[in-house]
């Protein structure tokens, strides 16, 4: 009996010829990730382990300051310094301070730290992002990360796999974010709990890498342990441009056993909106019949903070002004994205349209700073979650959408169908 893509990777890292869902394994890791929030607890845990004075491999740990950047107060500065000092003490070279990195899940692939067939764990739930590159990647609690710092191994249960097949070519203004919102709406927020989601279908071949990143990133929004794509020529070329270390490209067996198989017709898909207060409360844009006025539009995050996303936004906003009744906040995903956007004139277009462009980071997405919401405010966001209080006040409302829908809605001051702009040549 064959194995799924996730099972193949886990078996190799556990030193086993085969394994099955539900099996408990110890597996060696290729990379351990933490940010300034998860690192604080993980470092304390590491120091509490008897006999642990050195991390298992300083070249296989990445520490990224990205949640409060620049530090918003003395406490957040203290957390950042704690991680910085640990990186220096342990000679961890993959340490990314403010101005040199950005959002962890954007930075690591950029820097060639993720590759097909690898096992990556991180102290952040959206570590599943790296499944876009054919890796098994999952978020873990800080105690598990502390153990991984010390041992280079993790203990986990092998997840069953849900196979999702996407067919058809996306229509105008329909991108990976819309496809994944539809997926989360189909599965439900707990529909893939502790499962692997394995992405398949004709749609995937032509999907940009950033679209795959978005879809892998939001696997956790359906409760999944991980989301994973097969690494094709496009992914392999991307990775080889950024690293020369060897990696193994795994493939699911033809007779792999899946818990469920779901098919989604992308050709008929329209832009999607997730309504408050759940990522699975999804409607097609044509189902949004009421007028939803906005106070804020946010563009960025580990889900949609890539140069492709900013290009879409700039194309829509070029030569125009955002509506007077709202603010638009843009956080590029990384310093490299920021610089590329500057080189291409995108930052100027955004500023002329009335947008505020911030330091790359996660602040607004989780209600930390640089974009938090007040009581009664409504925000349309490219982020991945819209739970009560996610972006600030528990009395605020957050709607999720693609960069195109967010940009079009920024011009209108309310949620609109971005395809209406395409019809008039915008």
Image: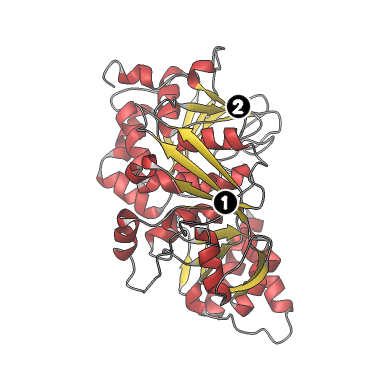
Residue carrying label 1: 258
Q: Tell me the quarter of the picture where residue 170 sits.
A: top left
Q: Quick one: 214 or 355, which is closer to the camera?
A: 214
Q: Residue at x 61, y 75 (%)?
A: 153
Image coordinates for residue 272, horizontal then vertical, percent? 49, 27
**In the rendered image, is residue 383 in sight?**
no
Question: How many marks overall?
Answer: 2
In the rendered view, how is the structure colored? Answer: secondary structure
Residue carrying label 2: 275
Assign the N terminus to one quadrant of the image.
bottom right
Q: Residues within 10 Å of mark 2 (few under 14, many from 20)?
A: many
SS class of the residue under badge 1?
loop
Q: Quick one: 203 or 383, which is closer to the camera?
A: 203
105 vs 290: above or below: below
Image coordinates for residue 199, horizontal then vertical, percent? 47, 47
98 vs 91: above or below: above
Assign the C terminus to one quadrant of the image.
top left
In this rendering, the label closer to the viewer, 1 or 2: 1
Q: Tell me the quarter of the picture where residue 411 sits.
A: top left
């Amino acid at each position: 009996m064959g194995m799924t893509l996730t099972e193949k990777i886990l078996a190799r890292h556990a030193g086993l010829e085969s394994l099955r869902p539900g099996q408990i394994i110890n597996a060696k890791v290729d990379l351990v990730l933490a940010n300034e929030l998860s690192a604080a607890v993980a470092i304390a845990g590491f120091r509490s382990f008897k006999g642990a004075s050195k991390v298992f491999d300083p070249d296989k740990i990445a520490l990224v300051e990205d949640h409060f950047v620049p530090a918003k107060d003395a406490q957040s500065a203290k957390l950042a310094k704690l991680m910085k000092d640990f990186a220096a003490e342990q000679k961890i070279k993959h340490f990314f301070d403010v101005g040199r990195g950005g959002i962890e899940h954007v930075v690591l692939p950029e820097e060639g730290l993720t590759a097909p067939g690898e096992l990556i764990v991180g102290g952040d739930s959206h570590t599943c992002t790296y499944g876009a590159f054919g890796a098994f990647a999952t978020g873990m609690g800080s105690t598990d990360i502390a153990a991984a710092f010390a041992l280079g191994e993790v203990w986990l249960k092998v997840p069953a796999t849900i196979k999702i097949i996407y067919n058809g070519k996306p229509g105008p203004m329909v991108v990976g974010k819309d496809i994944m919102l539809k997926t989360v709406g189909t599965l439900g927020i707990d529909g893939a709990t502790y499962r692997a989601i394995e992405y398949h279908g004709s749609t995937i071949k032509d999907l940009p890498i950033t679209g795959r990143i978005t879809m892998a990133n939001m696997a956790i929004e359906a409760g999944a342990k991980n989301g994973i794509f097969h690494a094709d020529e496009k992914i392999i070329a991307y990775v080889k441009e950024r690293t020369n270390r060897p990696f193994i490209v795994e493939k699911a067996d033809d007779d792999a056993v899946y818990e469920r198989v779901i098919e989604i017709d992308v050709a008929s898909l329209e832009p999607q909106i997730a309504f408050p207060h759940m990522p699975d409360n999804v409607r097609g844009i044509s189902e949004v019949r009421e007028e939803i006025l906005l106070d804020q539009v946010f563009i960025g995050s580990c889900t949609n903070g890539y140069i492709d996303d900013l290009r879409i936004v700039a194309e829509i906003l070029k030569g125009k002004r955002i509506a007077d009744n709202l603010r638009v906040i843009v956080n590029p995903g990384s310093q490299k994205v920021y610089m590329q956007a500057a080189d291409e004139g995108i930052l100027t277009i955004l500023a002329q349209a009335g947008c505020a462009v911030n330091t790359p980071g996660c602040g607004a997405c989780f209600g930390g700073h640089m974009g938090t919401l007040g009581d009664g405010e409504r925000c349309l966001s490219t982020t991945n979650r819209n739970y009560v209080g996610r972006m600030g006040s528990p009395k605020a409302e957050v709607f999720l959408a693609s960069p195109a829908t967010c940009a079009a809605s920024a011009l209108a001051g309310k949620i609109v169908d971005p395809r209406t702009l395409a019809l008039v040549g915008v």
